[in-house]
Amino acid sequence: MAEWFIQQSDEAEDVGPLRPSDLLKLVRSGDVKPETRIRKDDSAWFNASEVGGLFEAAMRPTIEYFCPQCQRPVNEPPVVCTYCGREIYRALTRITENTIATSSHASHDAPGKSVQRWLKNKMLRRGKDPET
């Protein structure tokens, strides 16, 4: 799977690696804009606007699947739930309509600060120390 990195204009370190789904979340939140410098794996840096379909993909609905027995997240059926072992051919679904934020919350911080805050919160939720 591809790993994405975001260039910080005011920091020595870049943000990443990010999964494609994480990059889409940052686009939706408005933290990654068309002029944001990003790179894929070990490629050269380029503007996010140069990634064909990135902003269109961020606008597409997100479909999440859940086991009808234990209600835990699962992959798209057919699949076996890793939590309860049930074979699933029709899952519960949740469809989220997505938009790209145009709020100015990122403009209150120096460039990249909101991305760093997002990544730090995500790592804390996963039980990782973001300082290591």
Image: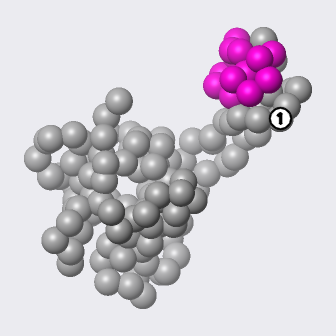
Q: Which residues are magenta?
A: 74-86
Identify whether 78 is placed above or below 99.
Answer: above
Of 52 and 8, the residue lying toward us: 8
Q: How many numbered discs sit on the rendered protein?
A: 1
User: What residue is shown at x 67% (from left), y 48% (from top)?
Assistant: 97
Q: Residue at x 83, y 35 (%)?
A: 71
- Quarter of the image for the C terminus: give it: bottom left
Residue 10 appearing in the image: yes
Dominant secondary structure, magenta: loop
Q: Is residue 58 above or below residue 106?
A: above
Q: Is 22 on the left-hand or right-hand side of 12?
A: right
Which quadrant is the N terminus positioned in? top left
Horizontal side, residue 132 vs residue 126: left or right: left
Res 83 → quadrant: top right
User: Residue 40, percent across and down?
Assistant: 24, 42
Residue at the outermost left position: 44
Q: Residue 44: give x, y in percent of width and height.
A: 11, 47
The residue under label 1 is 71
Give the amino acid type for the residue marked by disc 1 in the picture.
Answer: Gln
Say whether residue 3 is magenta.
no
Crowd around label 1: few <14 · some 14–19 · many ≥20 (10 Å)? some
Horizontally, is 102 left or right of 87 in the view? left
